[in-house]
Image (spheres, coloured by chain):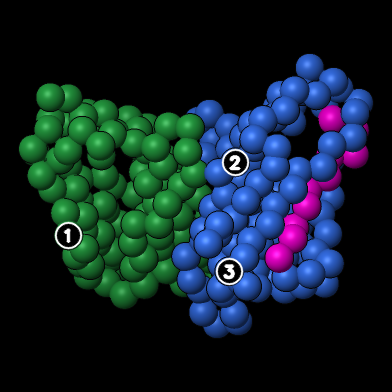
Chain colours: A blue, B green
Amino acid sequence: IAGITQAPTSQILAAGRRMTLRCTQDMRHNAMYWYRQDLGLGLRLIHYSNTAGTTGKGEVPDGYSVSRANTDDFPLTLASAVPSQTSVYFCASSDSTGGSYNEQFFGPGTRLTVL
Amino acid sequence: GQNIDQPTEMTATEGAIVQINCTYQTSGFNGLFWYQQHAGEAPTFLSYNVLDGLEEKGRFSSFLSRSKGYSYLLLKELQMKDSASYLCAAIDSNYQLIWGAGTKLIIKP
């Protein structure tokens, strides 16, 4: 049982390049999330998806896009990377339905550096 | 606006007890989580409180007061492996998680 996997583990990227961070879960959770974590700021929600086929914007969505074609996969794309997007990116999932809330399970993270 | 406050850093001695406080201001409230995050690793779930009172789970306990917008995480019999950051997160009326910046706990022998 893998839980949530993310790829790549780390990446150095030139500014202006396009990059997709991959996230896959095998727990059949309906909800998935992308966060960035920067020193002193805690986790900030970028985008989320409550169920396959739907996505929503979080606190810091600008410069990022997501898709949710199926239950298991939730890729995050940086269309044109900028240095301020240097961060650690965590994908998470939860078995959350309307009116209830369960814990989120996190992937191992992707450390992204934009030069 | 919505806000979570917790101390940036705390230091404690191995074998002792430490209490990490968290205050929250959210639009609506549907519960509060505590997560543990070791350096370079992903956050992992510790506890969830939605009703007032103390939830005990082994060496860790979590307390919630909804009227005061306050929670704490109590760690007993501290071990060196408890050195980590502890993240407080409140669920708002839209079932979105509002995260604190985390408290870095340093355990000294």
Residue A75 part of the magenta-drawn span: yes
Residue drawn at the location 90% of the way across and 35% of the way down = A18
Residue drawn at the location 86% of the way across and 22% of the way down = A15
Residue B34 part of the magenta-drawn span: no
> Horizontally, is A28 left or right of B40 in the view?
right
In what element is the residue under mark 3? loop
Amino acid beneath label 3: Met
The disc label shown at residue A27, or none: 3
Residue B32: x and y in percent read 40, 63
Amino acid beneath label 1: Gly
Note whether A89 is above or below A46 in the view shown. Answer: above
Residue position marked by numbered label 1 in the rendering = B58
Q: Quadrant of residue B103?
A: top left
Separation of disc 1 and disc 2 at Cα? 28 Å
Q: Quadrant of residue A25?
A: bottom right
Q: Please, which chain is the residue tagged with disc 1 on?
A: B
- Between circles 3 and 1, the one closer to the viewer is 3
Separation of disc 3 and disc 1 at Cα? 27 Å
* Magenta span of residues: A72-81
Residue drawn at the location 49% of the way across and 44% of the way down = B42
Q: Please, which chain is the residue tagged with disc 2 on?
A: A
In what element is the residue under mark 1? loop
